[in-house]
């Protein structure tokens, strides 16, 4: 099985993990802005459980979730599914902000109850431990991407305390901000930075930092929320309870990405891979640090993505041709 090391932790995981945001189900934004979805619509919990079981059978060992996904539902479902199998999985979750389980609403990280204090972090950790039905978290990630950089070291220090206490093994930050990531990277038990990265978009500066500090690059959005699977076009309709409902597939940024995808489609699929499998292969070829975490709602999606582990990274020739077609050769050399 194709594996990767989770940064300086030394923990070996499958080179691809499962992102568990979508299986959290319905989640609404209720932080004072216009009501909009932060979830992926209705889900079938039985299908989610079957998909996780199948992932384990196929060698997937890394699972990434967050306390906010479905207001705790994703964590509970993952904990339920891993009962009796906990030793087979490396579990990552996240904290930051508050939510209302009764209304399935995300209240935000600026809510009065969401002020990040040592007590807040400890409460969030204990709550995640209960929902996950475990006595330790392998990777605990800060989920406020733009948190005050002047106070970031205070958060990092509390996480170091939780490591000492055995509540968590390692920690990281889910952020696209280089300076913020660097604060955590200097912590003894920081093992990873989670950031947006895929074949068409993302933050390569964070990837460079991960290489500099011996950290794992956990790639969220490896399939650009489904755009890189080829299932969307200008006529696609997305339900209002789906976080992607505000996409502009006709002439917005999403339409531009689809045009770029068309430029490289033949390269991605030239060796028999699906678009999704090739997108994962691009990330593995881009750096030995990358661990993509594609989301899923069905067993079929898991099987297709897990098949990419057998196919491995794209070839050097494919990588070079993609860069030429996207006219970004110079940008990638840095």
Image (tube, helix red, strand yellow):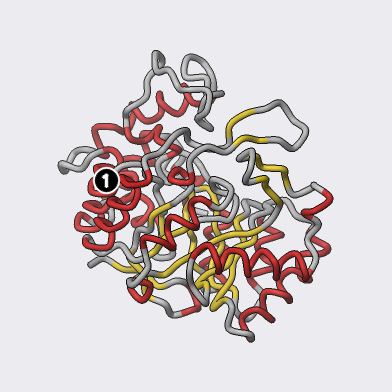
Q: Viewed as shown, does residue 181 lie left or right of 2?
A: right
Q: Which residue is mark 1?
A: 299
Q: How many marks?
A: 1
Which residue is at the far left? 272
Classify 55 as above or below 126. Answer: above
* Residue 310 quadrant: bottom left
Q: Position of residue 252 (x, y in %)?
A: 54, 20
Alpha-carbon neighbours of circle 1 within 10 Å: few (<14), some, or many (≥20)?
some
Classify 47 as above or below 288. Answer: above
* 328 or 70: nearer the viewer: 70
Q: Position of residue 218 (x, y in %)?
A: 48, 59
Which residue is at the far bottom? 164
Q: Position of residue 89 (x, y in %)?
A: 37, 69
Q: Position of residue 298 (x, y in %)?
A: 31, 42
Instruction: Name the image quarter holding the N terminus.
Output: bottom left
Residue drawn at x 49%, y 40% as measured from the top left: 201
């Amino acid at each position: 099985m194709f594996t990767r090391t989770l940064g300086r932790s030394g923990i070996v995981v499958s080179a691809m993990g499962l992102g568990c945001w979508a299986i959290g189900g319905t989640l609404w934004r209720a932080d004072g802005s216009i009501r909009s979805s932060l979830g992926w619509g209705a889900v079938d919990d039985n299908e989610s459980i079957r998909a996780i079981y199948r992932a384990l059978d196929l060698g997937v060992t890394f699972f990434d979730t967050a306390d906010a996904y479905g207001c705790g539902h994703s964590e509970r479902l993952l904990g339920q599914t891993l009962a009796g199998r906990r030793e087979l999985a490396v579990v990552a979750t996240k904290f930051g902000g508050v939510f209302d389980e009764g209304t399935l609403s995300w209240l935000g990280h600026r809510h009065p109850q969401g002020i990040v204090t040592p007590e807040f972090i400890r409460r969030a950790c204990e709550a995640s431990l209960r929902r996950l039905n475990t006595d330790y978290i392998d990777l605990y990630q800060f989920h406020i991407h733009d948190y005050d950089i002047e106070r970031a070291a205070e958060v990092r220090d509390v996480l170091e305390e939780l490591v000492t206490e055995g509540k968590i093994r390692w920690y990281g930050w889910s952020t696209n901000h280089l300076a913020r990531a660097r604060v955590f990277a200097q912590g003894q038990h920081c093992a990873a930075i989670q950031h947006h990265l895929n074949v068409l978009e993302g933050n390569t500066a964070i990837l460079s930092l991960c290489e500099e500090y011996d950290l794992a690059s956990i790639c969220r959005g490896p399939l650009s929320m489904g755009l890189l699977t080829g299932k969307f076009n200008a006529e696609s309709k997305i339900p209002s309870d789906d976080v992607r409902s505000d996409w502009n597939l006709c002439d917005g940024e999403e339409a531009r990405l689809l045009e770029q995808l068309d430029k490289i489609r033949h390269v991605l699929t030239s060796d028999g891979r699906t678009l999704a499998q090739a997108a994962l292969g691009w990330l593995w070829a881009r750096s030995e640090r990358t661990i993509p975490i594609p989301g899923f709602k069905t067993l079929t999606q898991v099987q297709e993505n897990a098949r990419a582990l057998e196919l491995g990274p794209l070839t050097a020739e494919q990588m070079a041709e993609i860069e030429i077609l996207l006219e970004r050769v110079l940008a990638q050399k840095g």
